[in-house]
Image (cartoon, helix red, strand yellow):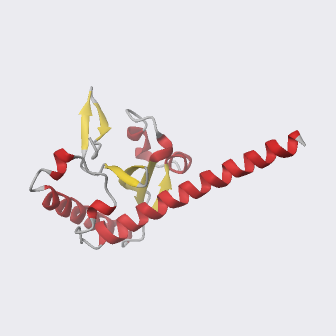
């Protein structure tokens, strides 16, 4: 009986983790399709957890629009917008060359996803609590010589 309870607990934890990953990947895929690729940023706050420092800047929407247009252009050239979404573990196991720079300065790897286009990381994303807290295309900050994610909700 004890073995059966342990097994059932293990299975339920695996299923809960799988559901959480699916929910996160759906959020990110919707963000990429509905905001980045479409260029329509009017619903950006449905996806991003933005801190007051960002929202109080009158130019923040223009910045995101320009940033996303650049990402879209890269995706059009690299993979005709046919991207893949990887978890951190999947990216490590797929031998993406540039993965090493993302192993530093952020330890919650289960929250890290990568939009990959033609075998290259186009857009690293960190999500927590069903919101995106970091999009790292050109939004990296240098910390002691290494790049760290710029957290949008700070």
Asked which quadrant contains residue 58, the reply is bottom left
Residue 80 lies in quadrant = bottom left
Task: Quadrant for the N terminus, please.
Answer: top right
Q: Is residue 150 above or below residue 73?
A: above
Does 52 appear above or below 148? below
Of residue 136 and residue 117, the one placed in the foreground of this image is 136
Kindly give the residue lying farthest to the left in the view shown: 58
Residue 91 in the image, given as x and y percentages of width and height: 50, 50
Q: Residue at x 80, y 42 (%)?
A: 6
Q: Residue at x 42, y 58 (%)?
A: 116
Q: Is residue 45 visible?
A: yes
Residue 76 visible in rendering = no
Which of the two residues, 46 or 132, is positioned nearer the viewer here?
Answer: 46
In the displayed structure image, the side of residue 4 where residue 115 appears, left or right: left
Q: Is residue 72 above or below residue 114?
A: below
Point out residue 12 in the picture as x, y percentages from the top left corner: 70, 51
- Please provide percent x and percent y for residue 84: 46, 63
Residue 149 picture location, percent across and down: 31, 41
Q: Is residue 60 left or right of residue 11?
A: left
Give the quadrant of residue 53: top left
> Of residues 32 and 51, which is closer to you in this image?
51
Which residue ends up furthest to the top in the rendered image? Answer: 144
Q: Is residue 9 left or right of residue 152?
A: right
Q: Residue at x 54, y 46 (%)?
A: 89
Q: Quadrant of the C terminus?
A: top left
| Residue plotted at (26% across, 51% down) | 50
């Amino acid at each position: 009986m004890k073995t059966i309870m342990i097994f059932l607990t293990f299975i339920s934890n695996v299923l809960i983790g799988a559901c959480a990953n699916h929910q996160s990947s759906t959020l990110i895929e919707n963000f990429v399709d509905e905001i980045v690729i479409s260029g329509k940023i009017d619903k950006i706050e449905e996806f991003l957890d933005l801190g007051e420092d960002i929202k109080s800047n009158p130019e923040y929407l223009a910045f995101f629009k320009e940033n996303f247009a650049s990402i879209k252009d890269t995706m059009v050239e690299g993979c005709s917008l046919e991207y893949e979404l990887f978890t951190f573990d999947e990216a490590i196991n797929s031998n993406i060359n540039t993965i090493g720079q993302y192993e530093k300065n952020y330890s919650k790897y289960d929250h890290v996803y990568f939009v990959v286009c033609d075998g290259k990381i186009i857009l690293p994303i960190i999500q927590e609590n069903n919101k995106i807290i970091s999009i790292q295309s050109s939004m990296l900050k240098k910390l002691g010589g290494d790049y760290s994610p710029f957290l949008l909700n700070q």
